[in-house]
Amino acid sequence: MNTNDPGSVLTDKNRAALEALAREIAAPVNEVEEIYLAEHAKLYSTARIKTYVSVFANRRVRSVFEMRHNLQRENVGRA
């Protein structure tokens, strides 16, 4: 894996998983990929064992969107 090229992280399998996640959370695929790449880079740079970095990055993407959704709901409730 070429860690200098962020796009190299996105294998066909990863892209398919991110597309499915984007559909599930009703978010644009490019936004999901952008957040995934950022989270993957953060995790990869400090991980001693790289095997599950993509799994944890995927979980972080889901968490980011869940937090956004919760904030939007709170803001709507206050309006």
Image: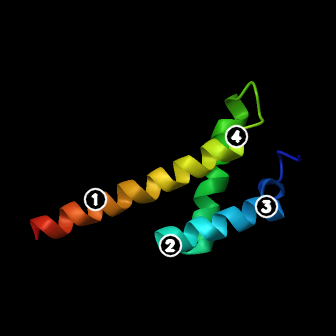
**Quick check: 73 left or right of 22?**
left
At 56% from the left and 69% from the top, the residue drawn is 22
Residue corresponding to mark 1 = 71
Amino acid found under the numbered disc labelled 3: Lys
In what element is the residue under mark 3? helix
Q: CA distance from mark 3 to mark 1?
A: 31 Å
Q: Which picture quadrant has residue 10? A: bottom right
On the rendered image, what quadrant is the C terminus found in?
bottom left
At 82% from the left and 59% from the top, the residue drawn is 11
Checking the image for residue 13, the label placed there is 3
Q: Residues within 10 Å of mark 2 (few under 14, many from 20)?
A: few
Residue corresponding to mark 2 = 27
In what element is the residue under mark 1? helix
Residue 39, percent from left and from top: 61, 47
Q: Residues within 10 Å of mark 1 (few under 14, many from 20)?
A: few
Q: Earlier in the sequence, mark 1 or mark 4?
A: 4
Q: Earlier in the sequence, mark 3 or mark 1?
A: 3
